[in-house]
Amino acid sequence: MNAFVSKLILVDGNSIAYRAFYALPLLTNSSGIHTNAVYGFAMMLMKILEEEKPTHMLVAFDAGKTTFRHESYQEYKGTRQKTPSELAEQIPLVKELLEVFQIPAFEVENYEADDIIGTLAKASGSQGVETLIVSGDKDLLQLVDEHVRLLLTRKGVTETESYDIDAIKEKYGLTPAQIIDLKGLMGDSSDNIPGIPGVGEKTALKLLAKFPTVEEVIAHVDELPGKKLQEKVREHQEQALLSKKLATIYTEVPLDFGLDRLQLPERNTERIVEFFRKMEFKTLLSRVHKQDHAEKGEAVKNEVDVREVASLSDLEEMVDVFNTGSLALFIETSEDNPHHADVVGLAISDGQAQWYLPWEVAEQSDAVRGWLADEERDKLVYDMKKTQIVLANKGIMAAGLSFDVLLAAYLLDPSESQLELSDIVSRYGDEPIPADEDVYGKGAKRKAITGETLARHLAAKAKAIHQVTPVLKRELAELDLDQLLFELEMPLASVLAEMERQGVFIDQARLEELGVELKQSLDRLEQEIYELAGVTFNINSPKQLGEILFDKLGLPVLKKTKTGYSTSADVLEKLAPQHEIVDKILHYRQVGKLYSTYIEGLKKEIGADGKIHTRFNQTVTATGRLSSTEPNLQNIPIRMEEGRRIRQVFIPSEPGWHILAADYSQIELRVLAHISEDEQLQKAFKEDKDIHTQTAMDVFGVAEDEVTPLMRRQAKAVNFGIVYGISGFGLARGLDIPQKEAREFIDRYFETFPGVKRYMDSIVERARKDGFVTTLSGRRRYLPAINAKSFGERSFAERTAMNTPIQGTAADIIKLAMVKLAQAMNERKLASRMLLQVHDELIFEVPEAELEEMKELVVAVMEDALPLSVPLSVDVNSGKTWYEAK
């Protein structure tokens, strides 16, 4: 038996299902079935199988509410709340999950899951079999022995703590058998085991350290410390003995099977994949493939057939291929950033056959170059923006890119962060492909991989693109997202590719001057801080700064960390009114960040052409907004004058040209007015009122000339806060006013704009029902936590539900404007260039002769990008630098 059973794992099914249900947001799939308990259970299951590698396994469940223990104590587990229906409906699915994994599941009438586990643990332990129990219930610690461990689930589902005999001794000072005595003395509220009233864990442990059992404690009651405790033990000794009996796991359950019935067969990956697809566990699909291959001791293999085109003569047979229907194209580069990368090679697939072309062969072929540039011949790709950039850098203007797998997967679930091609294939394809890291190694340069390994990997990618394309197209069509892909995101990708390649020119002399100016500011602020402190110290050291502020200057301590005083920005902002030094420190930090991020940082990013080529990320934010990296040009701080002056270094690349900046005015509030259909809010925009002044007039009930700067500031805070689902607490903190006053302000706002309140309430209810919200363009954002038990998770999801249709629609509007502007500028054959997008703002460089035409064109196109019930408004300015244009 010992040789046959290498390792046995016994899982407390009810405990793990309950923990998964309450640890994860209340997830549902598209059929409306709740899935969070099943998902959490699957995560735990896969972790156990991968890490512990059992040969035998069983999951035990409670058979019903009544057990033999109720004969001794009818109130046993009587305080437990009824199982939520959302969890109850998932228990059969958990059992189906186990069936799919071919893991035996048992329950026995009149006994609990603990008793089944105890019986099997005793049997296996007596035979010397390594046994692991998995549960969230500490009661099972009593089963630990020389051969039996307990894996106790802690936070979440997959975080666990392992207990053997020594660990129990270290944690409690007890033997495993004494866990029963511990429960006998202190009871267990979760099981309604009474114990001795007033005896908690601390007291019980002290008693058991001296008297090792409940019986011994009772026998030595006169020796217990304190008369009150003695009286309690005397009065409740029978209850203590009963509690010990109730807490004792029964290890003689009549089972009609032995350990040999618990052997795990070879896993059926197809069944698991099918179940995960039905449940819509997309992120687990890739894990099951990787785990399957890891268990077999192998990487995901590239069995794909590939024909390597090693020379131009080999290309002759491909001429006919180029004339067939849609072909998948994958281009590999030496690194991720297309502006610095070399092309390594490319692969082409028609879905059946694959061809690999080293770049040195492909670039010499007129047939290949012609096919890449032919817009009549469809090409399916992954990341069309990168594809266009790397080919354009080689002198080929890629055309005919008819489908982008990356953009399609992003639109189907914009919250999904795993968008590598292998991840997408694991969710939507039939045949897994290895991740780049598995082939190239972690952090390795791709150009280091050559030969057959590279050819097979790229061929597998091309084939995968061809095979997932119809699946993605079908899902996009079913969710009405195909128009968003083909008419907005894909055209935008081409616009962004051109903007990135164009880059923005930098005045390096001015950048150096600004660096000197900021360094002088830092030196001046440093001296002023030293004077106010009366001593020199390291301002960047939280420890030294804390000692100066709180020990030397005596400022009140608002927050402490593990290492001492907190000197975080929020703490310093609260302390600022109390001492002049705090404002100086805040200013010093801001200037220091400007210097390191935008002086030193920008210098590193300037290319040989004197330009910065930032990367616009289309598939990062869940709202649909673009983000900017390498470097991030969207987060240049403009509240400080020093920050605004950073924009002085961005200049036209041609002499005599201008920088033109066009900025949507209050676009999110205008979208809110449209979506909420609030008459008062719409009226203000239609009459071109200052919305913050108008809001102050409406909310405070005053005339325009009676609106004070404070009133307008408060109205502005609420106007923008409402868009983000601001709470009374949030507004109070932002305006530094009492919470009650902030709550009253919000209430008055909603009384004034009842349409906004109706919208906020209705969108949250719709999100609860649908599980997602949409923008006006149909962009989706899924909100799995909208029905979560946790108040914090649920509140965040509710705020997201309110905000996403607004912020997402604003993002769609400026994207539409970019696509339409690029088209209009091309049709008019203008020399002007679109350079940057910064949230609600577009930046262009424009020759003098086109300046007035561009101002008119930009305003006209941007204001008409997506017609709303209120007018969109665009502010446009020009200058010799981005700073002047603002």
Image (cartoon, grey):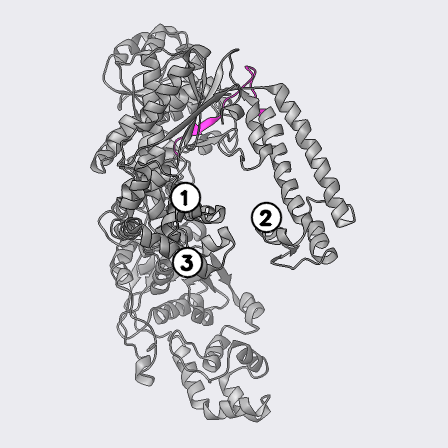
Compared with 510, 780 (above or below) is: below
Cα gap from disc 3 to disc 1, whole angstroms: 20 Å
State whether residue 425 appears in this view.
no
**Reading the chain from its start, which is encountered first: label 3 or label 1?**
1
Q: Position of residue 477 (x, y in %)?
A: 21, 34
Name which of mark 2 and mark 1 comes first in the sequence.
2
Give the vertical position of 800 relative to 115 (above or below): above
Q: Which residues are magenta?
A: 604-619
Between the C-alphas of marks 2 and 1, the distance is: 31 Å
Residue displayed at 72% across by 37% down: 524
Secondary element at tag 2: helix
Residue labelled with disc 2: 569
Q: Which residue is mark 3?
A: 743
Of marks 3 and 1, the one in the foreground? 1
Compared across the picture, whether 763 is left or right of 598 comes to: left
Q: Is residue 655 visible from the viewing direction of this image?
A: yes
| Amino acid type of the residue that numbered disc 3 sits on in the rendered structure | Arg
What's under tag 2, amino acid-wise?
Ala
Image marks 3 and 1: residues in contact by CB distance under 8 Å: no
Separation of marks 3 and 2 at Cα, in angstroms: 25 Å
Looking at the rendering, which quadrant does residue 206 occupy? bottom right
Is 266 magenta? The answer is no
Secondary structure at badge 1 equals helix
- The residue singled out by tag 1 in the image is 693
Q: Residues within 10 Å of mark 3 (few under 14, many from 20)?
A: some
Q: Quadrant of the N terminus?
A: bottom left
Q: In the rendered image of this protein, does residue 729 appear above or below residue 74?
A: above
